[in-house]
Amino acid sequence: MMPALPFDKVIVSLTTIASREQSLRETVASLVEQETKYPYEVRIHVSRDAYLLDTGFACEPTWVSSLSLGSKCTGINVVFTPNTGPYRKLLPVLEEAFSTGSDPVIVTCDDDTIYPDDWLDRIIDVYLTCRCIVAYRGHTIALTESGDFAPYTRWITEPKPLLSLRNLPTGKDGVLYRASMFNTAVHDIEVAMKYAPTSDDLWFRWHTIGSFIPCRIINTQNDKFRSTTSFQDEVSLWERFNSSGGNDKAVTALEEIFAQRTGEANISRLRAVIAEASRLSKIDGVEAYAPNTAYIDQALNTAKRERSFERLFNAPDGLRRISAETYEFLQIGLGLSLQRRGIPAKALPYRKLIMGVKTWNRVDYVREFVETFISTRNPRYDWTLIIADDGSTDGTLEYLRNLQSPVPIRVIENQSAYACGQFNSINDVAVELGFDVCFHADDDIIFVKPGWDDLYLNAMERSGFQHLVYKNHEQHLELTRRQRDANFQLPPEQIDASGTCSSIVDAESCGGAFYTVTPEVLNRVGYADEINFPIRGQWHIDFTMRCVRAGFNGSAHLYDARGSNDYITSWESREGYRCSLPWNDQYKKTKNEAELARRWAVVREPHRIYVPQRTSKRKVNGHASPGLPRGFIHLNDVFDRVYVINLKRRPDRLAAFSRQARALGIEFVAFEAVDGSRADLARTYADYVAGGVVKPDGERQIQFSRQFYLDRSFTEADRVAYLERNGKKAVASQGARGYLETYIAILKHALGNGYERVMIFDDDALFHRDFVVRFSVTASRLPADWRVFMLGAMQFNWDPTWVKFVGDDLYHCMGSSVASHAVGLTRPAMEELLQHSLRRDMPLDIGALSYLQREHAHECFVAYPNLVIQESTESDINTSSHLDEGNHKSNRFRWTLEDFEWTKQLIEQ
């Protein structure tokens, strides 16, 4: 049985002129015999009066009633309507929908085309995956370098993204709309016919761009359907009226009209979209797939909460192949406008906002903060105020408990969590509530006038910086003169490319009194570090520096919303300012020279981005708390230490890995590999080779690879003999021996430091473009008692007797997987792996590691499909000769090389 559909009617709508009646007949014959799952009716809109190329119809065409209908076509209706030219194709159906309160699917088409049997089925199927305008063909609106509309002729040749707000549907091969995508202004036919008499496509698109509704183009290569036989010599409206610049005139007129009606021309929306797509398409010159996936999940959750995009969670063109263009329409908040009628006063990409403030024993400060926030906030946003108190005794808690506010308030009663822990507790509650942007503030912030929230949100949207950091210019001037240079003058403001952000300091000189975070920031950067910064100072600099490394702001120029000082000030600018902490022994320790050096060393760690949840040791409501569930698992949440094996003579490989880790927010330590060519190891390896090969012991010998990998009745000595049956040693090279020694050293280091879980990467690892989200999903499905978790492996045999799948994302390899480039280990696994590695008689992957996965088969897992593969061009270890298999499109390892291309571009830098 077919599931319930999100619409109750499908209308195929078209119009025609008298001279095309024979062409119309051929078109309608193809429309009424569609092979589709969806019941539909066909409506033909004609007029008795003449207009443009139409001389008018005196009566209904006689042949209509003689057409035989397909099984799903419920009828053909000829509707006489005033002659508005091409607008008759859609406006009459919209008028009916608005008057009856219905919301049908409307598929418009032309009267000169033979439509394939699956035409209707296909366009509706696509709509159900993306819930936006869908067109078989279209153009992409092009802008000049100066940001103005390019001539329409350039739109035709502009590269066509699959899904974009910039896509303009063209009507010949079919366009799908919903009535709810429009507002009543679309019916202003007098204005439409005056300024765009033959540019109906532009008129309809301008109204939907105003509501931030993108268009999905199916045939991006402009493949065309077959024209009717009787249309060969007809002259089209475009040829007669628009080919000489009519559309360019219409665009100019429409922009003026929309600027007058809505206060904002559509070109400003499109400029923002292009800027965002451009920013997202490059992070250090790389396609930005994985870095955006966590935010996309949050955007989808928001859209789902707003009752749209339900099907996108399973759409093949949604999360499976995320691109900047897909991210584009999610980021601008399509889910917030799809089901709404009427153009909003201003299209808002952010809706659910949180103001989080930290306070302790400054009731007068927090009272003024709350009063100025409530009086100046923009009430059009969905606000929640979160106030974290750290155990005040001056009446602050009594004030907060009795506070009456038009804004929902959540009070967190901490106890000696200090600013760092307070910040983390606010984020926990924010994630619990769900949000688009969270403003973090100290209680000494004062809001001077309304508009600060719009200022910051606009700057975030236009610049792409999700972590904007407020800087009080007056305070910075006075403090610098007092502490460093009495003659200091503020430097000229540095303005970013969008013109909405400015900077007077670098990242290390950032303030911590007011800044923004988003769900993506938290998922990429994590928590404030309460271990390294337990009290006072540097913790907010560390957090901002990590945000900078993740691409959420600049480094040499740390940006704030331009003009912020006109809207926000601080008690610090007033006489009699009180610090939030007393000058006690604990505070004094933070100013100790050695302690300051230690803290700054942490802040300046070049690979430091993500701080896991468990690192923070927060105290919420006076009790140690693991934090509220966030529904997102980062690699550094799972593992105490992430090692990357790197030969000292290969800094290029470490640099390449570092660029990937930076893009994915992975914190790691480089572990110097043991070089097998080192003189002492070379001698040891020579002695190993000179010792001769191992001969089978006993009558029973391993004959087949299946026995080698899977049969537990054979000893490890039997396996060595099988590997050396051709007269060559099992550990086949000095590089492989050095690699084995490296693993032994890492295992000893991890066990000696008390680590419970570690991840070990080779430096030639390549990460899947959706790694961040895929790892979170896969890791969440691991049982508590897992021992080995491999993020990638070479699996040569997929027979059910060789592998056992555990759901869709994991499998047990039973010891049959090859490679060790991304291995996660628990402490019991480390202990056992070390014990067997010390035998030094087989390569690590098919020796000790294979043993663990064979003996503890149901506690060892491999990610499926692989989340990490190896760069196949060369290997310093030479543990396998099969890496080139990964280059094949349909390789036996079941990975798709294109999924890892974004990381290859990083490595080639």
Image: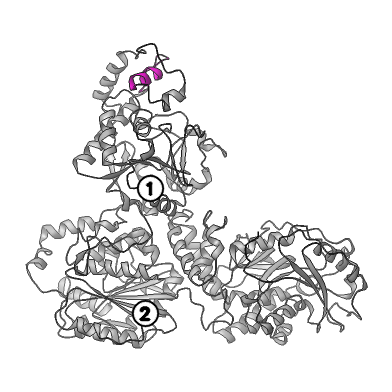
Regarding residue 273, the answer to whether it shows in the image is yes
* Mark 2 neighbour class, 10 Å CA radius: few under 14, some 14 to 19, many 20 or more: some
Viewer can see residue 821: no
Place of residue 471 in the rendered image (x, y in percent of width and height, measured from the top left): 29, 74
Task: Say which quarter of the image contains residue 29.
Answer: bottom right
Q: Quadrant of residue 99?
A: bottom right
- Mark 1 or mark 2, which has the lower sequence index? 2
On the image, numbered disc 1 is attached to which residue? 782
Q: Is residue 48 in the magenta section?
A: no
- The amino acid type, in three-letter code, at marker 1 is Leu
Residue that lies at the very extreme toward the top in this rendered image: 699
Q: Which mark is residue 563?
A: 2
Q: Residue 375: where, in percent of width, then height? A: 34, 88
Question: Residue shown at 62%/62% (left/top)?
Answer: 3
- Residue 866, position as x, y percentages in the image: 46, 43
Q: Is residue 728 magenta?
A: yes
Disc 2 marks a residue whose amino acid type is Gly
Q: Is residue 506 above or below residue 807?
A: below
Q: Which residues are magenta?
A: 713-731
Q: Secondary structure at mark 2?
A: loop
The furthest residue to the front: 1
